[in-house]
Image (tube, rainbow, N blue to C red):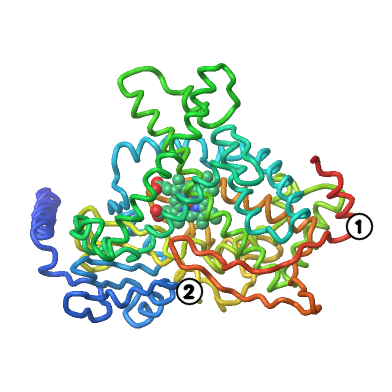
Amino acid sequence: MDSYPYYTAYVATVIIAVLLVCRRIRPQVYLSLPPGPRPWPIIGNLLDFPSAAPWTTFDRLGKTYGDVIHMRVMGHSVVVLMSIFLCDLVEAGWAMVLQGYTDSWRRSRRVFRQYFNRDVAPKFQEIQREETQAFLLRLHRSPDEVQGLVRHLFSSMIMRIMYGIKISEQNDPYVAIAEEVMKGFSEAGQPGRFYVDFIPFLRYIPTWFPGALFHKRAASLKPVFNAMVNKPFNVVKDSIVSGSTIPSVVLSMLEGIHDGTRREEDEMAVKSSAASAYAGGADTTRSAIQLFLLAMVLYPDVQRRAQAELQSIVGSNRMPAFADRPSLPYVQALILEILRWQPVAPLSMPHSTSSSDTYRGYYIPKGAIVIGNAWSILHDPQHYPNPFSFNPERFLKNGRLDSDVLSPTVVCFGFGRRICPGQFFALDSLYIIVSSILQLFDISHKIDECGQQIAVDVRLTSGLISSTEPFACSFKLRSAAAEALFSSLPD
Ligand code: HEM
């Protein structure tokens, strides 16, 4: 009797060892790749990669092949995941990378999280509030420039917080550099944008070769990438030397570095995490705000309802504060619906497997590009009935946020170890911007010279970050009380 457990353990160990050895040798012997559209000779499924809104094409393919699909592009595997289970996948020990899990990535990530985690991010709320109010003044002055002003708003927040730099209202050199970098990110990050993603040897073709777009683009971006990382960082370093420091995250990070053999690496981590805050937050936050404005024009009833909630909780004599947020469930639900309705990173961030693995009974080869279709999850009728309607109430039950509904924040900020480390800051920004705009302004269709409403519809850009094409809208102070409140804002 006593030997029975030992015998069982022995047999189990042998079985596991055999399975592990088999798996290491050739997992494909007994596992198939996930299903997917039939590939053509040589080009494989290249034609299944549309350049416009690929997430909807992938979603359609998913309806035929299931929520894990495989495609082959120039001999390279691409796996598209369209289920919330992909969170499990990443948590289950997959090493997925876009630029590699290097020591320097780990260091930057650690430094970044130290300043932007859930507990520390609220320290920046005062600057977020002040910059939002400055934005409202500019918006009232130049409503037709709203697109540029929204862009300027995030830049002004993050440059002040990271470097203590107050950017100028127009033609700011730091913003110009960062915006050029953002354009490059958006192009390079779109899966299949440059064929070199799938045909690595193209990397070695000469720059003069027709179609070697990626070489030209990379060369033009190199100096701006360098400037973005170094220029504002050097301002902080110079201020230390001259004794004229202004409080900032980079200053605190630098003060936290102790002299030693790793000083250069630690400084690089500070540089990289500071520049990543701009790169990670600028287009995403801007895009979410533009989608909010678009939704307010298209769904005036939702706008009225959010304003009614603000009126009942905040009143009309002061601006919304962060302390009001728990009492404003409809405003919170509205923000969740914006993140769900048109996710700003519809395909999250493409990753790559660093070793072969299995997932849900399928073989996933080493080096496969893995794309999580966040858009598909956020439009899954099982989680969100009637997913194409804009309806913040789907997140509410008995006047509170309904914890049974899958929060879009679980999906739209990515998954696993690479999950967006700026998410708490992002949600704070969205809350203060959305509630402040609604407190003062009615947002509606713009009227043309003939007195007709200028039509607005949902036209999205395609890229790693998806935003709205520019659209016309009007901002009017809502009431006499809003006018008085607006006049009381500090200039
Ligand atoms: C609505 C706003 C935002 C959305 C939807 C968003 C979404 C995302 C997504 C999908 C990723 C990729 C995650 C992955 O690789 O799986 C990401 C990464 C990242 N985000 Fe955000 N983000 C937002 C705002 C911000 C803000 C405000 C910051 C900075 C303060 C930020 C900083 C970053 C950084 C640094 C990364 C790279 C993380 C890494 O590779 O380790 N994000 N974000």
Q: Nearer the viewer, residue 477 or 395?
A: 477
Foreground mark, 1 or 2? 1
Q: Residue at (81%, 78%) from the top-left corner?
A: 451
Q: Nearer the viewer, residue 326 or 348?
A: 348
Q: Residue at (50%, 73%) from the top-left corner?
A: 379
Query: Would you identify the image quadrant in which residue 329 lies?
Result: bottom right
Query: Does residue 39 sit above or below 2 in this rendering?
Result: below
Query: Does residue 446 sit above or below 238 in this rendering?
Result: below
Residue found at the far right of this picture: 480
Mark 2: few, some, or many residues within 10 Å (few <14, many ≥20)? some
Q: Earlier in the sequence, mark 1 or mark 2?
A: 2
Query: Does residue 283 sit above or below 252 in this rendering?
Result: below
Q: Is mark 2 within 8 Å of ligand 1?
A: no
From the image, tell me which residue sits under label 1. Answer: 480
- x, y (%) of residue 108? 39, 37
Q: How many marks?
A: 2
Q: CA distance from mark 1 to mark 2?
A: 43 Å
From the image, tell me which residue sits under label 2. Answer: 380
Q: Is mark 1 within 8 Å of ligand 1?
A: no
User: Which numbered circle lies on residue 491?
Assistant: none
Q: Is residue 478 left or right of residue 189?
A: right
Which kind of residue does numbered mark 2 sit on? Asp
- x, y (%) of residue 359? 26, 64
Q: Residue at (66%, 45%) from the top-left corner?
A: 169
Which kind of residue does numbered mark 1 sit on? Ala
Q: Of helix, strand and loop, which one carries label 2? A: loop
